[in-house]
């Protein structure tokens, strides 16, 4: 049996690797304006990130997504991607807010990055900064073109929907997916904002998203054997582009979860919503050998619960918010 199989039989071959908790934006659903960042010396160095990735690879991790905070605000991001690319992961991608991608797309692709996910929650110039508090839509749209031009494909566009904020743009995003033949993924709002303001009424159920789009543009489900990605996928019956929905809140996919996470300060976590953590950084800085890092990964996996329990009475919010974990 592969090393990273948990007690529920779930194989974990996907690693979300956060390289910073900092960000140049302050999206309302993620980071408060007065958020505090970790001192830099608490974050993993490039060498430490490389060592953790190597151990993960040896345990059978096949795919790595670099994230943050905003990964492109870390000066060494190209060096980090090159280090990971040398290890031969089958899939190496990065999630970004897109504001700094235009200038970095080519060096990242040259370093071995295969794909990017770009977050964009509104296609309206005036609304964009209301949600992300900083940044301009134009930069993000330009970044999408820059990414595709250097072969960072397929491009996925992440849209977090919130009731009364941007749920009137569902069809605009569907048309955007069709026009540009891109994958647009609608993510349900999760209780991971640093302000602790999330409430369930703000969540736009994925079912509603699909029904809204299908009424105007007929959709059919896409099934790929062995695909454990969290998104339920749909294609347009009459053309290009794709829609995905990530229904973490209303239709949790914990039963097929294949992800482990490492935070920017080096903690391995087995779930976005669980504060069960083991510090790989502290182990490395106290002279641990690779066997001890392996044991920390396996220990984390052994403690993984069957589900995140958002809907259970005793659910407690994670002590860390999304940007401090790595989404
Ligand atoms: N800064 C990058 C970005 O925005 O794409 C990468 C990190 S961000 C934490 C990763 C993803 O998490 C983004 O698509 C973002 O929109 C999403 N996200 C952040 N907070 C969220 C929340 N409370 N609920 C759902 N998704 C969230
Ligand atoms: Fe920054 Fe991404 Fe969080 Fe927005 S979602 S504040 S861009 S880390």
Image (tube, rainbow, N blue to C red):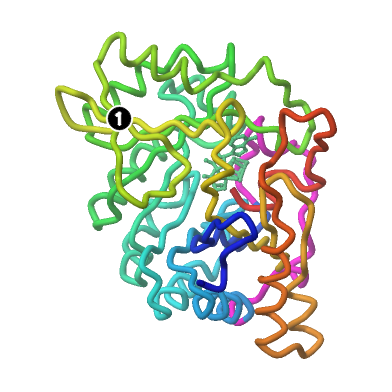
Give percent across and percent down for residue 277: 77, 61
Is 140 situated above or below 301? above
Q: Which residue is mark 1?
A: 221
Pick whichever, 268 or 130, lies toward us: 268
Magenta-drawn segment: 23-47
Pick whichever, 74 or 172, lies toward us: 172
User: Horizontally, is 245 left or right of 34 in the view?
Assistant: left
Q: Is residue 33 magenta?
A: yes
Which SS class for mark 1? strand
Is 225 situated above or below 279? above
Instruction: Look at 39% across and 19% down and name the residue there.
Output: 210
Query: Main SS type for the magenta part?
Result: loop
The reply to whether residue 31 is in sight is yes
User: Horizontally, is 60 left or right of 130 in the view?
Assistant: left
Pick whichever, 208 or 86, lies toward us: 208
The reply to whether residue 265 is in sight is no
Label 1 Cα neighbours within 10 Å, binned few <14 / some 14-19 / many ≥20? some
């Amino acid at each position: 049996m592969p090393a990273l199989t948990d007690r529920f039989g779930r194989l974990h071959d996907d690693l979300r690797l956060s390289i910073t908790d900092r960000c140049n934006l302050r999206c309302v659903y993620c980071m408060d304006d007065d958020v505090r960042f970790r001192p830099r010396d608490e974050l993993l160095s490039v060498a430490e990130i490389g060592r953790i990735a190597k151990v993960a690879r040896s345990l059978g991790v096949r795919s790595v997504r670099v994230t943050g905070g905003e990964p492109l605000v870390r000066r060494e991001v190209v060096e980090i991607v090159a280090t990971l690319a040398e290890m031969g992961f089958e899939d190496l991608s990065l999630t970004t807010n897109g504001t700094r991608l235009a200038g970095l797309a080519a060096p990242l692709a040259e370093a071995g990055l295969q794909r990017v996910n770009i977050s964009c929650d509104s296609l309206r110039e005036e609304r964009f900064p209301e949600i992300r508090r900083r940044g301009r839509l134009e930069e993000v749209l330009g970044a999408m073109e820059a990414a595709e031009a250097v072969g960072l494909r397929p491009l996925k566009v992440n849209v977090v929907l919130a009731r009364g904020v941007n749920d009137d743009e569902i069809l605009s995003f569907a048309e955007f997916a069709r026009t540009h033949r891109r994958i647009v993924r609608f993510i349900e709002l999760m209780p991971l904002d640093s302000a602790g303001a999330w409430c369930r009424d703000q969540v736009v159920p994925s079912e509603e998203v699909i029904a809204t789009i299908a009424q105007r543009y007929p959709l059919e489900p896409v099934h790929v054997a062995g695909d454990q990605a969290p998104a339920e996928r749909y294609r347009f019956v009459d053309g290009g582009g794709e829609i995905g929905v990530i229904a973490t809140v209303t239709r949790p996919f914990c039963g097929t979860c294949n992800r482990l996470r490492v935070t920017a300060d080096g903690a391995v976590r087995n779930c976005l919503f669980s504060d069960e953590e083991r510090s790989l950084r502290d182990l490395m800085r106290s002279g641990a050998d690779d066997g001890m890092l392996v044991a920390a990964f396996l220990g984390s996996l052994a403690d993984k619960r069957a589900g995140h329990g958002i809907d259970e009475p005793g659910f407690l919010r994670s002590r860390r918010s999304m940007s401090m974990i790595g989404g």
